[in-house]
Image: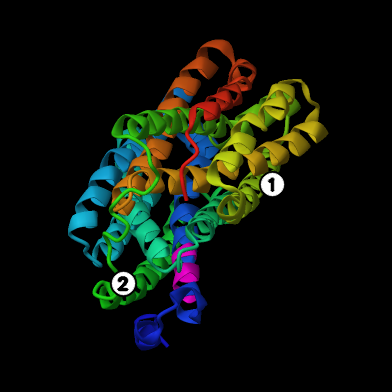
C-alpha cells in the first residue's frame, strides 16, 4: 500500500502523534535520508582510489569535497526559504533526479573536471532534499520535534556509515565504473520520494505550515540574532572536526598505522556508526531535558577525547573515535530544533541554513585541512583539530528559552 493511500486516517485523527501513519511517514523520510546520505558517502569513500587513479593531491581531494559541499550549502537556505512560502511536493523527486545523474557521471568520469561536475550534481540533489524532508518530518512529529529531527537525522548518519562498506565491497576492488551500481539505489530513492511527496501533497491542506509563527520564547530580535551566531560557531567547531575524520581518517590510519585501504574503511565505519547512534539519542533527550543541555554535553564534552586522540595507539584510536563520534553527533538535532524555536514559522529556511552551514563549513574545512595536510602532514592536522571542541564553551552564551 502506498504512503499516500494512508492519508484518510491521518485526516480523521486529531492527535497525529498517536496515529501510526505519522510514524510511518517519519520512518519513510528517515529511510530516504539514509539512501540520500549513503549515496553521498560513496564520494569520500572512493577518494583513495581516485587519488591513485588520477594522481591527485590532498588539495585536489579537498576541492572535490568543497565543490560538493558548497553546491549543497549555497542552495539549501534558498530552497527552504522558497518552500516555506510556496511548498511544492515535486521538489523532493526532482532533487533525486539530480543525484542520479551525478552518480552516472561519476562512474564515467575520466578527468578531474568531470569528477567535480559529478560532485556538484550530487550536491544539488542534497540541497533540495534536506530542507523539504526535514519539514515533512516535523509535520509528522505530533509535536515531538526533537524525536522527529533525530530520527530523520539518524537515517542520514546510518547511510553515511554504510556508504564506506558498499564502496569497499563493490567499488574499490573492481574500479570506478562500478559506481554505476549505486544508481540502482538512487532509483529506489526516487520511487520512495515520489510516494512521500504524494502524502505531503495530500496533507498540505491539513497542516498549517506557518503554525507557531508568533514567537513565545520571550527573546528580543537582537538576542535571537546573537543566539543564531553562537549556534553557527558551534556548528563550525563540530563540523570542522568531523570533517577531519570523515575526509582524512582513512589517510591518517594508513599513514600512522600502515593499515590497508579496506581495513581503514572498517575503522571509518565504526566511527560513522557511532555518529548514527549519537544522533538518534540527542533528539529525544533534548525533548526531555532541553536543547541547551544536550549542546553543552555534545560539543564541550568531546574535548578530552579529541585532545587524547593524536597520542593514542591503534586500539585506543578506534575506541576514542567511537566515543568522539557518539558525543559530537548528539548536538546537531538539538541545534536545529533550538534554532527553529528561535525563528518559528520558518522551518524549511532554518533547516536549509543549518544543513547548508553543515555542508559549507565541512567543505571549506576539507579544502583547508587538505592544504595543511599537504604542507605539514596529516598528523599535524589531527593535533590542530583536537582543540576545536573547546569552542563548546560558547554554549554558556545561549539563552534559556521559555516553554
Is residue 173 placed above or below 62 in the rendered structure?
Answer: below
Does the magenta stretch mainly form a helix, a strand or a loop? helix
* Residue topped by disc 1: 270
Please say whether residue 168 is visible from this viewpoint.
no
Residue 29 lies in the magenta-colored region: yes
Residue 354: quadrant of the picture: top left
Q: Residue at x 50, y 22 (%)?
A: 369
Secondary element at image label 2: helix
**Residue 134 point in image, percent of width and height:** 39, 57
**Disc ID at residue 200:** 2
Name the side, left or right, on which 77 lies relative to 327: left
Image quadrant in which the N terminus is located: bottom left
Asked whether 370 or 241 is in front, the reply is 241
Considering only vertical position in the picture, is 34 above or below 69? below
The colour scheme is: rainbow
Magenta stretch: give its range. 24-30
378 within the magenta span: no
Residue at 76 percent across and 20 percent down: it is 311
Amino acid at each position: 500500500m502506498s504512503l499516500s493511500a494512508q492519508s484518510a486516517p491521518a485526516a480523521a485523527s486529531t492527535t497525529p502523534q498517536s496515529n501510526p501513519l505519522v510514524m510511518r511517514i517519519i520512518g519513510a523520510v528517515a529511510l530516504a535520508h539514509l539512501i540520500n546520505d549513503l549515496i553521498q558517502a560513496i564520494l569520500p569513500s572512493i577518494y583513495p582510489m581516485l587519488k591513485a587513479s588520477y594522481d591527485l593531491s590532498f588539495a585536489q581531494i579537498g576541492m572535490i569535497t568543497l565543490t560538493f559541499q558548497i553546491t549543497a550549502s549555497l542552495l539549501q537556505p534558498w530552497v527552504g526559504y522558497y518552500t516555506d512560502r510556496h511548498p511544492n511536493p515535486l521538489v523532493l523527486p526532482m532533487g533525486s533526479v539530480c543525484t542520479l545523474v551525478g552518480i552516472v557521471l561519476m562512474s564515467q568520469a575520466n578527468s578531474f573536471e568531470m569528477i567535480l561536475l559529478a560532485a556538484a550534481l550530487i550536491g544539488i540533489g542534497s540541497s533540495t532534499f534536506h530542507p523539504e524532508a526535514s519539514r515533512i518530518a516535523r509535520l509528522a512529529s505530533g509535536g515531538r520535534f526533537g524525536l522527529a529531527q533525530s530520527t530523520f537525522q539518524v537515517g542520514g548518519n546510518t547511510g553515511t556509515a554504510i556508504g564506506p562498506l558498499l564502496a569497499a565491497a563493490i567499488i574499490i576492488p573492481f574500479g570506478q565504473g562500478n559506481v554505476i551500481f549505486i544508481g540502482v539505489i538512487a532509483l529506489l530513492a526516487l520511487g520512495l520520494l515520489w510516494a512521500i511527496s504524494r502524502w505531503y501533497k495530500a496533507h498540505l491542506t491539513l497542516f498549517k505550515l506557518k503554525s507557531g509563527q508568533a514567537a513565545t520564547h520571550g527573546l528580543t530580535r537582537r538576542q535571537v540574532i546573537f543566539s543564531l551566531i553562537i549556534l553557527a560557531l558551534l556548528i563550525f567547531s563540530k563540523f570542522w572536526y568531523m570533517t577531519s575524520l570523515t575526509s582524512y581518517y582513512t589517510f591518517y590510519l594508513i599513514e600512522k598505522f600502515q593499515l590497508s585501504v579496506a581495513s581503514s574503511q572498517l575503522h571509518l565505519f565504526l566511527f560513522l556508526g557511532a555518529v548514527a547512534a549519537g544522533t538518534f539519542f540527542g533528539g529525544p533527550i533534548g525533548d526531555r531535558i532541553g536543547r541547551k543541555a544536550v549542546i553543552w554535553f555534545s560539543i564541550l564534552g568531546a574535548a578530552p577525547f579529541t585532545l587524547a586522540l593524536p597520542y593514542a595507539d591503534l586500539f585506543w584510536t578506534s575506541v576514542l573515535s567511537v566515543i568522539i563520534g557518539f558525543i559530537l553527533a548528539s548536538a546537531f538535532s538539538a541545534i536545529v530544533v533550538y534554532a527553529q524555536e528561535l525563528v518559528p514559522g520558518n522551518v524549511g529556511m532554518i533547516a536549509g541554513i543549518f544543513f547548508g552551514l553543515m555542508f559549507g563549513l565541512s567543505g571549506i574545512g576539507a579544502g583547508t585541512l587538505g592544504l595543511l595536510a599537504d604542507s605539514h602532514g596529516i598528523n599535524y592536522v589531527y593535533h590542530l583539530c583536537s582543540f576545536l571542541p573547546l569552542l563548546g564553551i560558547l554554549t554558556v552564551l545561549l539563552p534559556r528559552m521559555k516553554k
